[in-house]
Amino acid sequence: MCFHTHAQDLTPTVIIGHKVPVCVYKGDTIPCVTLRNIYVYPKLKFKNKRQERYYYKLVRDVKKTLPLAKEIKRAVIETYEYMETLPNQKARERHMKLVEKGLKQQYTARMKKLTFSQGKLLIKLVNRECNQSSYQLVKAFMGPFKAGFYQAFAALFGASLKKEYHPEDDDKMVERVVTLVENGQL
């Protein structure tokens, strides 16, 4: 009698891929992937080189200031939530002084690097992200005196903390660029 044995092939198999969620449809297990939205706008037609330079400058400025506006939004939310847990007004005022000091330390150097137009854009983007003007935010957290002081300081340079964001009118192009940047299309 002769017995022949056959062993399994032990060469390792490398599978390259990604783990994705699955769903079962009529007994079949199929990959289930949610794709992000893709925004399609009509192709821009520039009247002249100046208009084209303005657009690409706006894209650059939005890419630089949008992350700052989102950080400010997070800081406002965190500060507001923490302030709600404090027992009295004196504790809130003490905390606000610490927050103000920390914000100045964290953001002064970055804010100084912004151009004038980037600063004005940041004011609008903060309004977009927080649904409140920068003036209202400063007034709510630091009081009307400091809000007035910062507004006067901004006015010296031709800016306004009370500037609002209007995505359907004046800021239509800004909204387009912000949407595309947020979605990773620019």
Image (spheres, rainbow, N blue to C red):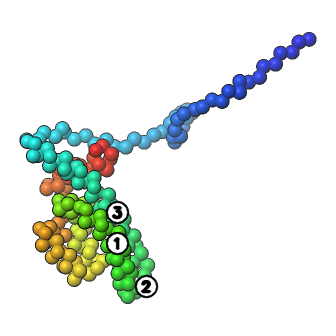
Where in the figure is residue 88, as x and y percent of width and height? Answer: 40, 86
* Pointer 1 local density, CA inside 10 Å: few below 14, some 14–19, many at least 20: few
Residue located farthest toward the top when viewing the structure as drawn: 1
The residue where tag 2 is placed is: 87
Task: State yes or no: discs 1 and 2 in contact (Cβ < 8 Å).
Answer: no
The residue where tag 3 is placed is: 71
Q: CA distance from mark 3 to mark 1?
A: 14 Å
Q: Quadrant of residue 46?
A: top left
Q: Quadrant of residue 1?
A: top right
Q: Quadrant of residue 16?
A: top right
* Pointer 2 local density, CA inside 10 Å: few below 14, some 14–19, many at least 20: few
Residue at left offset 17%, top offset 66%: 163
Where in the figure is residue 148, as x and y percent of width and height? Answer: 19, 79
The amino acid type, in three-letter code, at marker 1 is: Gln
Where in the figure is residue 51, as x and y percent of width and height? Answer: 11, 46
Q: Is residue 63 left or right of residue 82?
A: left
* Pointer 3 local density, CA inside 10 Å: few below 14, some 14–19, many at least 20: some
Q: Choose mark 2 or mark 3, whichever is in front.
A: 3
Tag 3 secondary structure: helix
Q: Quadrant of the C terminus?
A: top left
Considering only vertical position in the picture, is 149 above or below 38? below
| Disc with the residue nearer the chain's start (2 vs 3) | 3
Q: Is residue 14 left or right of residue 82?
A: right
Q: CA distance from mark 2 to mark 3?
A: 27 Å
The amino acid type, in three-letter code, at marker 2 is: Pro
